[in-house]
């Protein structure tokens, strides 16, 4: 009888332990899937991105040092008021979207892309679409993003950009020019899914294009001097 009671007690303890472990696993999964909001007292890469973007838009969060202090909070509140958002000084999903930031992924980049990817995309947009309307700059970025998803092209941003013969600016030195401010914003929009090209995977300037093949592609949009095609 005593052994049976001991077995029952041991079984009860094991069941209790199993329930506790399951609860802990659920809590860990929930905490891991929820993204912490940037607010007063926060620090890290996302805060730096927010501060940098506020500076670009003419607000004064102080230095882009990755520390969410009172000055950054005031700048966020001013931005939120101007955008008609809840002016709580907390950078949630709506404020990030208004800033043109999708928020960093678990790897630390925008929408799954790294800081270096973002910088590279902006540099290519600036070189390839210099002098084009802003919509055309976003469209050039969108073509690059569309190629990543297309089976005929490499499946990484750097792979698409450095594919031999893909972008003339890599050969003529244009990629080394200073990056236009608008190209950074265009890169953000393209990474976040904006696509004025309507799904194009090619673009060209008919006045400069030397390939006869490119003229055979179906044009689906014309923005500025560029034709966008599939």
Image (cartoon, helix red, strand yellow):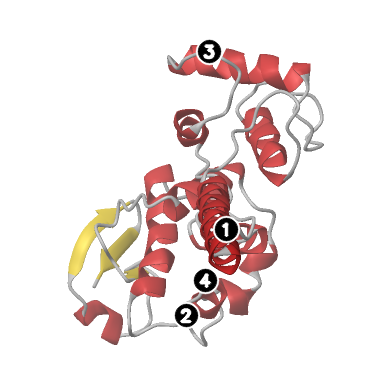
Q: x%, y% of residue 55?
A: 68, 29
Between circles 1 and 4, the one closer to the viewer is 1
Q: Residue at the spot x=66%, y=63% of the render?
A: 116
Residue 137 can be seen in this image:
no
Q: Secondary structure at mark 2?
A: loop
- Indicate the position of residue 77 as horizontal and vertical percent values: 60, 15
Q: CA distance from mark 2 to mark 4?
A: 12 Å
Q: Nearer the viewer, mark 2 or mark 4?
A: 4
Disc number placed over residue 9 in the picture, else none: 1
Nearer to the camera, 145 or 66: 66
> Where does the image place residue 190, in percent across and percent down from the top left?
43, 53
Rounded to the nearest angstrom, the CA distance separating label 3 from label 2 is 45 Å
Neighbour tally class for label 3: few under 14, some 14-19, many 20 plus, Cα within 10 Å: some
Give the left or right position of residue 43, taking residue 106 as reference. right
Q: Earlier in the sequence, mark 1 or mark 2?
A: 1
Q: Secondary structure at mark 1?
A: helix
Front position among marks 1 and 3: 1
Residue 52, x across and y down, in percent: 69, 36
For the C terminus, the quadrant is bottom left
Quadrant where the image shows the N terminus = bottom right
Residue named by callout 4: 157
Mark 1 and mark 4 in contact? Answer it, CB < 8 Å: no
For marks 1 and 2, give the one nearer the viewer. 1
Q: Quadrant of residue 209?
A: bottom left
Q: Say whether disc 2 or disc 4 marks the residue closer to the N-terminus.
A: 4
Report, in whole angstroms, how far the alpha carbon at label 1 lies from the one at label 2. 71 Å
Residue denoted by label 3:
87
Of pointers 1 and 4, the one earlier in the residue sequence = 1
Depicted 161 relative to depicted 46: above or below: below
Whole-angstrom CA distance, mark 1 to mark 4, is 59 Å
Which of labels 4 and 3 is toward the front? 3
Name the residue that disc number 2 marks: 166
């Amino acid at each position: 009888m005593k052994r049976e009671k001991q077995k029952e007690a041991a079984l009860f303890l094991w069941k209790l332990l199993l329930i506790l472990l399951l609860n802990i696993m659920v809590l860990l999964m929930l905490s891991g899937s929820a993204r912490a909001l940037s607010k007063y007292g926060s620090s890290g890469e996302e805060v730096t991105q927010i501060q940098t973007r506020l500076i670009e838009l003419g607000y004064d969060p102080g230095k882009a040092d990755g520390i969410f202090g009172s000055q950054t909070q005031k700048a966020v509140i001013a931005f939120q008021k101007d955008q008609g958002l809840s002016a709580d000084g907390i950078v949630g999903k709506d404020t990030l979207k208004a800033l043109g930031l999708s928020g960093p992924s678990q790897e630390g980049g925008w929408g799954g892309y790294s800081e270096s990817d973002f910088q590279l995309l902006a540099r290519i947009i600036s070189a390839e679409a210099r002098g084009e309307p802003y919509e055309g700059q976003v469209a050039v970025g969108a073509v690059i993003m569309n190629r990543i998803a297309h089976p005929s092209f490499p499946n990484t941003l750097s792979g698409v950009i450095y594919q031999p013969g893909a972008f003339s600016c890599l050969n003529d030195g244009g990629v080394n020019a200073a990056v236009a401010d608008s190209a950074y914003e265009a890169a953000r929009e393209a990474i976040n899914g904006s696509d004025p090209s309507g799904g194009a995977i090619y673009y060209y300037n008919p006045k400069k294009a030397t390939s006869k093949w490119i003229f055979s592609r179906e044009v689906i949009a014309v923005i500025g001097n560029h034709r966008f095609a599939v």
